[in-house]
Image (cartoon, rainbow, N blue to C red):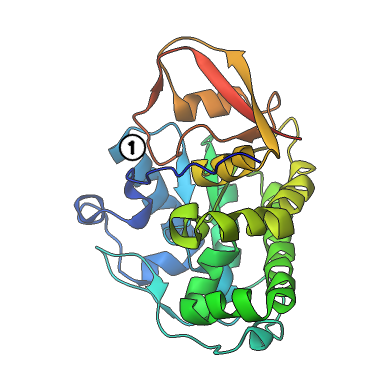
Amino acid sequence: MGEIKDFNCTYDNSAGINGEVTAKLNLTFPDAYLHHETMAELSKALKEHDGAAFCELPFCHTVEAEAMGGLVNYGNDKTGPRAKEYICTKPEELLELPAIDFTTGRIHEVLLACKELRKQGQHVVLQVSGPFTILNVLIDARYVFKGMRKQPEVMKKVFWKLGDEILRFMEEAKKYDVDLISYADSSGGVNILGPKMAEQVVEDFTFEFLKKAEALADDKTMILLCPKTSFALLGTGHAKFKDYLIDSGTHYGEACIQMVGKAKFAGQMCIKNVGYQLESGIFKELQLI
């Protein structure tokens, strides 16, 4: 077993929201975060501001948790939606949360916004959160780590309850023509969990979860992985990189778009680093083994 390397997550584009952009739009906040028409308009404006190759939605990491009953502060024109207060204090309570209804609420509006942007000829990166990120909205992290130490089997059930909902979200996204699905769970990185717990999460959840997600990647859809997830899989011997030659200097986002239908997983760089260029002309597909 190798060592899980960490990825220093310092890159950010405007998915979190940008006051300079919102000031130029005739939108009312936080109402603009709640409707697909305004979501699409804002996402396209942010794409143009960043010089990105794609539009990105949603503007936060709270959509899935809210759809399961979590409480969210919708923010304003300078800060996007964020967690409000926790609704659970015990891992067992998490298992009782409802399944996501994709036909209503903000999560439905996000999907409609994706479809609208695709109709306009835009490429869309849908940000999908992993279990630790979702849990951050639902329960204090100290109860999560306590549960992982003292109730590992219960927490494994929690991860898979959330994992099944995430997979359903990914499946639903394909129905709305999303071509790039970004899966990230930086709250569960090795820098937070430590090597031993990070390895356990890969063995208990991440690898098998991504094996199921892999089936969703096809000629129209690719899955983008946060490098923290890539390194966890590589370090535990569950993945390898396969190199593809592309034009030298291609921006990473553009390379991902080019590789849809050719690669199932991307994962060599953070998709938020919109200025990153593949100077070597090598795109690395992450392959599960």
Question: Which residue sits at x=52%, y=23%?
Answer: 255
**In the image, residue 3 lies at what x, y percent?**
55, 41
* Horizontal side, residue 119 vs residue 44: left or right: right
Per the image, the residue denoted by label 1 is 48
The vertical placement of 174 against 243, above or below, is below
- The quadrant of the picture occupied by the C terminus is top right
Q: What is the three-letter code of the residue carrying label 1?
A: Glu
| Residue 222 in view of the camera | yes
| Residue 68 in view of the camera | no
Q: Residue 277: which quarter of the image?
A: top left
Judging depth in this view, the residue of 252 and 133 nearest the camera is: 133
**In the image, residue 265 lies at what x, y percent?**
65, 35
Q: Secondary structure at mark 1?
A: helix
**In the image, residue 140 lies at what x, y percent?**
47, 81
* Horizontal side, residue 179 vs residue 187: left or right: right
Q: Residue 145: which quarter of the image?
A: bottom right
* Horizontal side, residue 92 vs residue 63: left or right: right
Question: Which residue sits at x=53%, y=56%?
Answer: 185
> Label 1 crowding class (10 Å Cα cut-off): few <14, some 14-19, many 20+?
few
The vertical placement of 6 against 60, above or below, is above
